[in-house]
Image: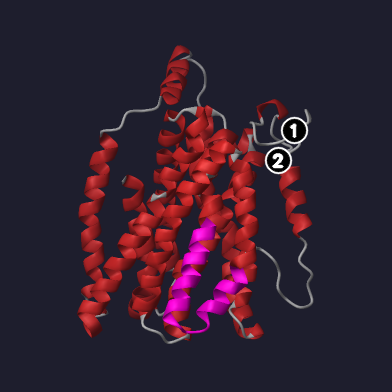
Amino acid sequence: MGTSLEWYDFFLFGATASIVFAPLFFGGEDPALAVLRIVQGMAVGGEWGGATLLAVENAPEHKRGFSSAVVQLGSPTGTILSSMIVAAVVALSGERFLEGAWRIPYLISIVLVAVGVWIRLKIDETDVCKQAEAARSATPHEKQSAPVADTLRAAPGRLIVGIGTYLFGNAGFFVLTTFMISYVTKQLDLPSTVILTAIAWGAVAQIVVMFIAGKVADKTSPSIVVAVGYAIAALVAFPIFWLVDTRDTALITVAMILGLGFASIPYAPVGTVLTQLFPVKVRYSAIARTPEGAPVVDAGGRYLMPGLIESHGHPGMYACLAMKADCRPSVTPRASDVVKAIREAAQEAEAEEWVSGWRSTGSGTAP
């Protein structure tokens, strides 16, 4: 419930930023939008990390993949709520939407946030957290440092792996939502209700796929499901844009169902992978940093994408860059360089602490 409310606000900001905030307040170039989004992203990371730990640490070991997927349901649920509420307000208010009706979804969120805070105050800590607190209390004279600093000092390789693991959950999702809203309304000149409704149906597909992916992760391995999901997402990247470019409402809806549905395969069990990746002492802070670090890595590509779309004449360049490949004709993408960099960074972590689902050779080698 709390995660759904957090993602409602997060996606609501993304949806209204392109059709309300930029033209009304910031002229499309003011850095204030970016600052506001950074603050909101930090809040989402903290909320999502806590929710993930509560679900995964309280679940039996053979059901942790599914428990992670349940937490991730907050994203499509929040997407459905925000998409449909904004679409309804747009349809009912017409030209008055930009005059002030856009505030209605935000006023609704005040009530939703109050409910979320009340729920969080009623939840107890996990047994793992209580044991860690008891161990710390038993050594009161031991110097305690900030968990974030501990993570950067003791496990920087794991943090890099964690950010890379979460990266598509950030980049891919906002290509299919925030960017697509702007592209469909401004470039294709279609009503915003077309893409908002399509995204809502895509979110429904997310819910179905997440349940399935979570179950499969428990039967196989969460890390395997994440890797396979990334491969599938890469394959459907260009077809999604081809469908959207038809300007046909039904095909745009199919594109969002395919895009958001397949993107949910790696997203469903990612919380379990990240929970296993970090030791208890720094787990919460480290997990919270991954959804915050992923946008930083993705930011460079986002600034390059509009220019590449214009110079190459097709928005498929955006999808290509979202997969972190350089699409310029003079450059050959080298995924092996990315894999090599991640492996080298991960070698800094202690070999004996790599968890099941990641290959350990006794020398700290990453998968």
Look at the picture and state if 163 lies above or below 139: below
Look at the picture and state if 293 lies above or below 361: below
247 left or right, relative to 112: right
Q: Which residue is drawn at 79% across and 77% down?
A: 330
Q: Residue 218: image x %, image y %?
A: 54, 37
Residue 346 - label: 2
**Which residue type carries mark 2?**
Ala
Residue 146 visible in the displayed image: no
Q: Which of 227 and 100 is in front in this view?
A: 227
Q: Residue at x 64, y 65 (%)?
A: 235
Q: Residue 27: image x %, image y %?
A: 40, 80
Q: Name the residue carrying label 1.
A: 364
Q: Give the range drawn in magenta.
A: 237-263
Q: Which of 49 and 172 is in front in this view?
A: 172
SS at mark 2 in the image: helix
15 left or right, relative to 210: left
Q: Which of 221 and 281 is in front in this view?
A: 221
Q: Residue 72: image x %, image y %?
A: 44, 48
Residue 242 location, quadrant: bottom right
**Which residue type carries mark 1?**
Gly
Q: Residue at x 36, y 48 (%)?
A: 3
**Closer to the N terminus: mark 1 or mark 2?**
2
Q: Residue at x 27, y 45 (%)?
A: 116
Look at the picture and state if 231 lies above or below 141: below
